[in-house]
Image: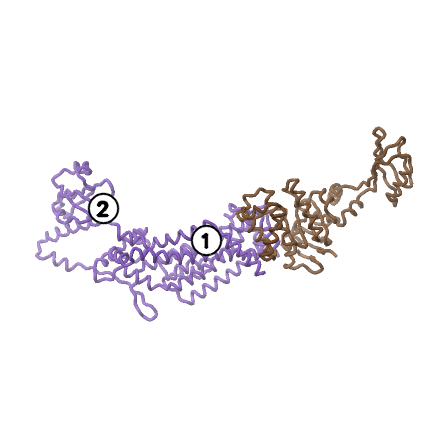
Amino acid sequence: MNLNNLSIIIGREYTTRVKKKSFLILTFVVPVLFAALCIVPSVIMAVSKEESKRVAVIDESGIVLPFLESNEVVTYADYSDYDTDSVKSTLDELGMDALLHVSRLDTVARSLTVDSYSKKPLGIELVASIEDKVNDAVEDYRITSYGIENLDRIMDEVKSNVSMTTYTLDESGKESVSSSEVYMVISMLLGMIIYMFIAMFSGTVMSSVIEEKSSRVVEVLVSSVKATELLFGKIIGVALVALTQFLMWIVLTLVIVSVAGGLIGFDKITESASMTDPAAMMSSMGVDPETVGNMGMNMDLTALTAAADSTAAVSPMAAVMNTLASLNYVQIVVAFIIFFIFGYLLYASLFAAIGSAVENEADTQQLQIPVTIPLLIGFFIAFYSFKAPDSGLVFWGSMVPFTSPIVMLARIPYGVPVWQLIVSIILLIATFAACAWVSAKIYRVGILMFGKKSTFKDLWKWIRQD
Amino acid sequence: MGIIECKSICKSFGPKIALDSVSVDIPKGKIFGLLGPNGAGKTTLIRIINRITIPNSGEVIFDGRPITQRDVEKIGYLPEERGLYRKMEVGAQAMYFAQLKGMSQRDAQRELKIWFERFGIQDWWKKKVEELSKGMAQKVQFITTVVHKPQLMILDEPFSGFDPVNAELIRQEILRLKAEGSTIILSTHNMESVEELCDNIALINKSKLVITGGVNDIRHKYGNNNIELVYTGENALTADASLFDILSDDNNAGRHTAVLSLAEGVTTNDTLAAVLSQNITVNSFKELVPRMNDIFIKLVTESE
């Protein structure tokens, strides 16, 4: 290989892409989004208080109303003497947001039913708070009905409110409070980002190969440089673009977060955030707590909420902060760069070979399948890895070269033994070398083949051709 | 000694034979026509000379020694299917190609400036290729082919896509480059330009070399040794069995156009002297050489 030619090719691939508007936009917009993701949820929680609701209450049981205490979020008004239907139809005139109808007490089941009517749906938190209060009222009624003296006090004493604080032990046996959601979020983010990066930039290489072929520039190029120089110049040039973008993202995100943090005041953010319950925080981050629960997280949201209320337990925000602080960022960044580089090289060389066999993007679909499928499998295993970070599937997914870049990154926050990292990287590099060799053979022949649609049989023929 | 000597080049793609033991010698400082019908193997031969394709057997000698990858810097190649990066600026693109041919940034800049001025296209430097017309892009492409002063230029159908004015401009540039000592391989189907520009040719058909040699030699070889004579006179020209035979003689109000067939070994001078001795006025005396076009058709159909 002629290094001078290689560097000229890398230079062109790099500069033309870095100067593109789409690159600049992506480079500057994404950090803003990242920073927003870091800051906005806490800011929202700090500043947004729902507008106070006014609720008309028709209490036929007579036991619930005393429990409904008005506060800054909701005001209850007693409409028990009014007719349900007339209140329902005149909510606006009465200046009420909702009507709460409590049924007569069923003395056999010792229970009652509650319905609410409103123009706009009530917020989850308000509904939960009303339900809590109604339940309190019914419980109180039942306790009283036993006629046992001091039963209410006994019940209060019996009530237990234990929540688990999870500690992770490091090598030295030092324990730290951890939040498993943080591991999950980081693991998902890493898996997604590396998948996106590999898919996006390998795709760029493929389009660029197709562009050179369909515009026929390629024939002039290979009359000046060797096909392999052109291929690897292109792959390396695009890789540098990707790394530039990645590093810019890190730097810009840090800058924006620290500047914004300085402006708003970080203490205030963390303080307010630590008082809010994790369910609300997750939902404001766009994660539906219920889905998280369904995903099999060993996480009891109510327990955590309770923990937030009780001063004795560690606050969840502190656990989040603690977990974030305990992560080995150097390892994450280094692993990301290594796995991205070799995962990208592996896929980019395969995509380049596909690109060389076709004349326009539309023809790539069939040839792409065997390359896209392992990439997608890697993505799905990575998604599974926060569920069972130590399962066999995830382990092998992080070892098999075609899925390892994505799955290993998703595993990293949970801690991966060094020997596994090394074996995985060696396997990946070896596979890349083999695939690059095959791809170069396909590429060399493919870029000069015009007119007929290539099939896998053709590719096989090109590999064997000298 | 030729700048390029192809020695028994064989190349096959799977079962398909593209070149079957083709040997051609391309003399230095001349224009060499590479002729042949579509699919004959011309492009494969050009790609082998360019080291884009490696032959199965045989070798290419460049300037007296086996060609190496470094030698491609001394070759300029204008492929039949032209192509430039559509989204790239003309100047940056020309710089890129020049640097890939081993020019330093400074040299490339200087030489390109000269060429852009010569073609009157200085203000295209910052334009993107997609903004140019096809003919304009062709001019840029021609410059990128020749800017590094290659010893050998391979031009595949260089005139296609040009209007007559620009085709003439390119023709003049080719002649100028030849005068400066460059060797040019011209692959074309335009037989008039072959006659006009080429010193030597090679004709390839069905992956085999049919004929190679000087254009004049070939034309004479395939000529029938005929002369076209235009004369005026009272009497018609009479044949002289030892010198020439009259194949036809059209009389148009005393102005005759005759075709003479010379006997074996008779020179045109002897014939002219014999004609002058007859009582006629000679208006023109012209050797009838077959057109390259006719030779091409004849050879290709014969070898079918």
Q: Residue at x 34, y 53 (%)?
A: A36
Q: Residue A88 location, x and y as percent?
A: 19, 38
Q: Nearer the viewer, mark 2 or mark 1?
A: 2
Q: Nearer the viewer, residue A255 or A454?
A: A255
- In the picture, one chain is purple; tell me its letter: A
Image side of residue B231 versus residue A323, left or right: right
Where B179 falls versus A418 (above or below)?
Answer: above
Q: In the rendered structure, the residue with mark 1 lies on which chain?
A: A
Q: Residue B113 location, x and y as percent?
A: 60, 51
Where B70 falls versus B122 (above or below)?
Answer: below
Query: Does label 2 or label 1 sit earlier along the sequence?
Result: 2
The quarter of the image holding the N terminus of chain A is bottom right
Residue A301 found in image quarter: bottom left
The image's mark for residue A51 is 2
User: What whole-number distance in Å separates the C-alpha atoms at marks 2 and 1?
Assistant: 45 Å
Residue type, mark 1 in image: Ala
Report the residue marked by disc 1: A199
